[in-house]
Structures are given as C-alpha cells and as structure tokens.
Image (spheres, rainbow, N blue to C red):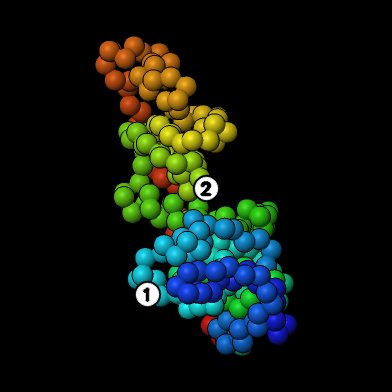
Amino acid sequence: MTASALTLAVDAVGGQASPFLAHRPVASMGPRDLGVRLAFVGICGTDAEILHNSLPSTFAIHYPHSLGHEWSGMVEAVGSAVCSIAVGDRVLGHGHLGGNDWFGVTHDGAAAEVFTVPAAVCFPVPAGTSLLTAAVIEPFACVLEAITTIGGVSAANTVHIYGLGAIGLTVLLLCRNAGTSVVVFGPSALRRERARAVGAFDPSTGSVCDLTADATGRMCSSRPPDIPAPRPMPWRAPTTVAGWC
Ligand SMILES: [Zn+2]
C-alpha cells in the first residue's frame, strides 16, 4: 500500500464542515483489514448532511476524515488474519462499524485512490456484476433493509414515494418487483418519466383517480380492482465473507 493517497475529505473549520481534496496518509493496516484501490464511490445525502453540518450530533465525526461509504474497488493488500478475500478480488462494502460508528461518515472512508477498510464490512463482487453497479449496492441494501423491517411490500399495498433520488427510485424498483402499486411525487420530470416507465402512477400527468382507472379499466366510482395474490419480497440472507485465519 502506498503511504498517501489523493482523498476527498472534510474538516471542521470554525464549527463548519469544510471539504478539501488533498493527499492524506493511508491508514496503516491491521491484521483484519484490507487495502483497496477505489473503483467507484457515490456521494450520498449523508455526505451532503456532513458538508452542511446538519448530521445529528449523535454521529461523532472524527475530523478530518475522508468521505465515501458506498463504493467498490480492487483489493491490493490483505491483513494476515483475513483468509476469505485475496489480493486482486473485487469488493464492495457497507458502512456500519458497530454502534454509531460508520465507515466514511464518522471515520475515514472510501473517497480516496487507495484506502484501508475492515474486511468484516466487505463483500466480493459477483462475476458479471460491474464495479459501477457494485458501488450502488450499499444504498440499494439500505432500502431493502427498510422495506424488510416494515414487513415487506406486496401487490396488496399501494406505496407513495416522495422524492425520486437514488433512494426513492430504488424503493420504486423494489416495490414494482413485488407487484406493489406506486404513486410518485417529485420535481424532476425526467425522474418521474423514468418512474412511469416501470409502472409508477404520476399524478402530475393526471389525477390518481384517472390513472387508476386507466390502469385497471374501471371507473373511479366502481369497486376497487381485484387484488392479486401477494408476491413475497425476494430475500436471500447475506453471505458472511469475513473469515479469519
Ligand atoms: Zn449513504
């Protein structure tokens, strides 16, 4: 691993968060760490909250620190206790370090050419999945977790989505995959168009009542459409990949 890397970081200056781009030392590796060369990193709403100093104070940010908690990359170094991931593997990671400590949020993250990350938060990228796609699996997983936490969704539900950013659109995809009816609200015509393309109702193009009538062939005053049998959310338990020698 190199000693330093070009890094997108944030510091606290006069009580305000201040971003900067600079070469920063790469954290030394422990036996359960990986050294990773970045492929892709996302900029999340949480990053914007950090930069606007609006993250809840319960997140104890260790300034200065590098941003980046949704990412993918290539393993360049492996700690001596890690035996499940090898140099050259493609990996992605989640951010939860335990408690309210978060990789890339409260602690140094992935927005650097190379960085050190605990192997326990990393997963191999399956063959056939691009590193670009892999970098957005973390926010996708956040949405899946949220939907799973509320008991899942099915064709028996109608979901309203307010805001069609990455999270809102991901909610839309998961809901539509489960056969759920979705009504979307958002200021971006392009994003609403993309939402309509996967079957969302967009009230800005007509009333929900009209859209429902179009979709079901029934008048608004008629009885509700027959509800198809619920289809369970696809769910596969995450694979634990961190193995210790
Ligand atoms: Zn995020």
Classify mark 1: residues with Cα within 10 Å, few (<14), some (14-19) or many (20+): few
Q: How many numbered markers are drawn?
A: 2
Image-based side of 231 in relation to 19, left or right: left
Image height of 164 relative to 35, above or below: above
Image height of 219 relative to 244, above or below: above
Tell me where residue 201 appears, x and y as whole percent. Answer: 44, 27
Q: Which mark is residue 10?
A: none
Mark 1: amino acid: Gly
Tell me where residue 158 appears, x and y as whole percent. Answer: 34, 33
Quadrant where the image shows the C terminus: bottom right
Nearer to us in this view, 12 or 187 = 12
Image height of 20 relative to 182, above or below: below
Q: Can residue 179 be seen? A: no
Q: Which mark is residue 99?
A: 1
Q: Residue at x 48, y 48 (%)?
A: 167
The residue to which callout 2 is attached is 166
Q: Residue at x 40, y 32 (%)?
A: 183
Nearer to us in this view, 189 or 173 = 189
Give how far apart the Cα atoms at labels 1 and 2 are: 26 Å
Which quadrant of the figure has residue 31?
Answer: bottom right
Image height of 22 relative to 203, above or below: below
Q: Can residue 181 be seen? A: yes
Disc 1 residue lies near ligand 1 with CB under 8 A: no
Disc 2 residue lies near ligand 1 with CB under 8 A: no
Q: Callout 1: helix, strand or loop?
A: loop
Tell me where residue 60 appears, x and y as whole percent. Answer: 41, 75
